[in-house]
Amino acid sequence: MNSLNSSVSEIELPQIHDPRGDLTFVEGGNHVPFSIARVYYLYNVPVDAERGGHAHRELEQVVFALSGSFRMKVDDGFSKTEYWLRDPRRGLHIKNMIWREMDSFSQGAVCMVLASHPYDESDYYRDYGEFQQALRAGS
Ligand code: T46
């Protein structure tokens, strides 16, 4: 069974700073503990939008605020906590079977996500009751 502490953690990426600006890079299997199969990003998000509201059976992801900020609420079915993402060097690694909800997007926020698998709708629990049932069944 997942525990929230072992299933959600912050990852800090390198930053190369020089007078021309900052450069940050990310390598799958190194900074991110899986091979990156997919990258997607959220942008033009209305400040009052709520995204997420699901969990994944297998998928692991690392979520970044490349620009601006937003709140990420996470829940393993037993306990809940929240993170504010606002630093493009600091990502949130979320393992499978974690319910997540995102809100409080700042104007112009850009959220980038590195994912361990290609998109697969059958990997989603989009119903909280089903998610809880699956946790109780240990699946
Ligand atoms: C997550 C948060 C941070 C695709 O066709 N391909 C994709 O790679 C993704 C991510 C989504 N879609 C389709 C599925 C839906 O028809 O795009 C539509 C919106 O997806 P969703 O409602 O799942 O978007 P969010 O922002 O609520 O959640 C997404 C990810 O799905 C999720 O895994 O953790 O971003």
Image (tube, grey):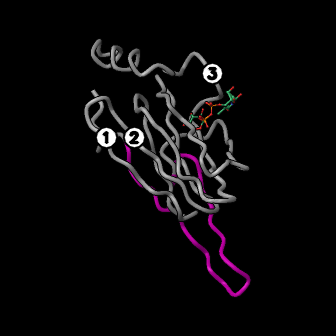
Q: Residues within 10 Å of mark 3 (few under 14, many from 20)?
A: few
Q: Amino acid at mark 1?
A: Lys
Q: Is residue 14 magenta?
A: yes
Q: Who's the residue at 66% across and 71% down the image?
A: 23
Task: Tell which circle, 3 or 2, labels the residue nearer the N-terminal end.
Answer: 2
Q: Residues within 10 Å of mark 1 (few under 14, many from 20)?
A: few
Residue pointed to by mark 2 = 74
Residue pointed to by mark 1 = 80
Between 61 and 104, the one nearer to me in the picture: 104
Magenta-tinted stretch: 8-31
Residue pointed to by mark 3 = 120
Q: Amino acid at mark 2?
A: Val
Label 1 – label 2 distance at C-alpha: 6 Å
Label 3 – label 2 distance at C-alpha: 21 Å
Query: Quick check: 92 left or right of 67?
Result: left
Q: Is residue 30 visible?
A: no
Q: Are marks 1 and 2 in contact (CB under 8 Å)?
A: yes
| Element on which disc 2 rests | strand
Q: Is residue 46 visible?
A: yes
Q: Indicate yes or no: mark 3 CB to ligand 1 under 8 Å.
A: no
Q: Who's the residue at 41% across and 22% down the image?
A: 128
